Image (tube, rainbow, N blue to C red):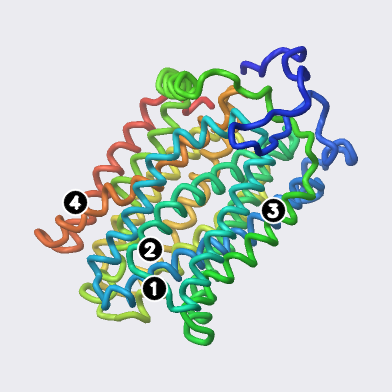
Amino acid sequence: MTTGRPLARVTHEALHLSEDGLAFEAPVAAPAAGLVEQPAPPRQDRIGALRLRDFRFLFIGTVTSGYGQWATMIGLGWLAYVLSGESAAQLAWVVAVGGAMRLISAPWIGVVLDRYHRRSVTVWSTLASAALGLGLGLLVLTDLVAFWQLYVFSALEGIISSANQNVRQTFVYDVTTPDTLSNAIALNAIAQNLSRISGPPLAGAMIGLLGTASPFLFIAVMMLIATFFTLLISKTTRQAALDTDHPLRSLWVGLRYVMTDRPMLGLLLSGAVPGIFLYPYIPLLPVFAEEVLNTGATGYGLLAASVGWGSLTGLLVLSWLGDVRHKGAIAIWGLVFYATALIVFTQSTVFVLSSAMLVVAGVFHGVAFTVAQILVQVLARDEMRGRATSLFQMGFSLMPVGAIPMGMAIEAWGAAIGVGGFIAVAWLWFLFMGFFWRSLLRA
């Protein structure tokens, strides 16, 4: 694996100023303070990464910021639905604006993550999210909120949340050791799933008890807590030398790198294909609950939770196993079984079987996606890590691209054939990768 830039170029300055005047600390070549204080934990230590001071603070910040992000999703959706006079179309457009901005900004965020110290990017993106939530919350409290403001909020939040999620994922590498990286990424994914399971019900309860403004004020509180713990992380990490190329050249170099490196290209496709052919089933779960299973809103909530519980189970197992071998094969074949379970789900008319298949799908997806994240961090060249991570994470942003044709397929052929057909295409692609993408299978 190619290393970062020479030491002489890493230590040439102690401070770098961005164009807007914000100070971003340049990394130095010395090991991170949070890592030097303690030796690497033994291999059998299943929570080894949590014993590292800096990762522990990052983990806490990821949990708290995750609650803020779910409060954003639930609060914005409800507010848009109410202000639009209960218009599903207007709600969809607000959500689509945020998704489009995530998709457009992701490659540029990768450039930022390689250009500035990732601790600073984490702090500023978390603070920006807090300010955005506080601003919208005050507008709702003072009854000054207008529907057009939701488009602005959704667009800005799409960029900010994409930056925050990507930098927290990339930052895991910087605050861990080679022996604890796999464990740290699994634990980081567990942190995200904890907020995924409990965040939406909590935000919904706040709206019912405290009013529509409460989720946005909650965002501000959670993000400020996350910022506090981020500031406790050492300023010196093992991040590579900061990229100094022109941003356009940095973007082009990053794109060319992931497109020409066969294992990285395979990982990129393993994240992009689900975004178009698999993940769009998630916002369409109400169709299965209402029209296929006849369980209504209660059934919808249980189906949505099943995926989260499955993912959490798979991640706990992965964390317990530690640094597994044959990561490429696990990532690809895990996606094959993930798609298989979803195909069975789309054909089921029995609620218990449908829920069980979503749990199984969650287990395989949690393991496969997290192992793929580990591979991105391990295989990426040091100076490309931010760009590689951001491009890989773009898969989730592609969901709106697949949701529209999948919805049209449901209207034409029904949920079982419409969604099942899309998933079958992804299943065939992953099967092809499982047999023929040898450079990734050997990783």
- Circle 3 sits on which residue? 59
Between discs 4 and 3, the one toward the N terminus: 3
Along the line of sight, which residue is nearer the eye, 442 or 403? 403
The residue at the far left in this view is 412
| CA separation in Å, label 2 and label 1 | 8 Å
The percent position of residue 77, horizontal first and vertical second, equals: 38, 68
What amino acid does circle 1 point to? Answer: Leu
Instruction: Name which quarter of the figure residue 117 lies in.
Output: top right
Between discs 2 and 1, the one toward the N terminus: 1
| CA separation in Å, label 4 and label 3 | 37 Å
User: Which element carries disc 3, helix, strand or loop?
Assistant: helix
- Circle 2 sits on which residue? 150
Q: Which marked residue is nearer to the observer: mark 2 or mark 1?
A: 2
The residue at the far bottom in this view is 209
Q: Which marked residue is nearer to the observer: mark 2 or mark 4?
A: 2
Between discs 3 and 2, the one toward the N terminus: 3
Dot 3: few (<14), some (14–19), or many (≥20) neighbours within 10 Å?
many
- Circle 4 sits on which residue? 405
Tell me if residue 415 can be seen.
Answer: yes
Residues at circles 4 and 3 in contact by the CB criterion of under 8 Å? no
User: Which element carries disc 2, helix, strand or loop?
Assistant: helix
Instruction: Name which quarter of the figure residue 82 lies in.
Output: bottom left
Tell me if residue 439 can be seen.
Answer: no
What amino acid does circle 3 point to? Answer: Phe
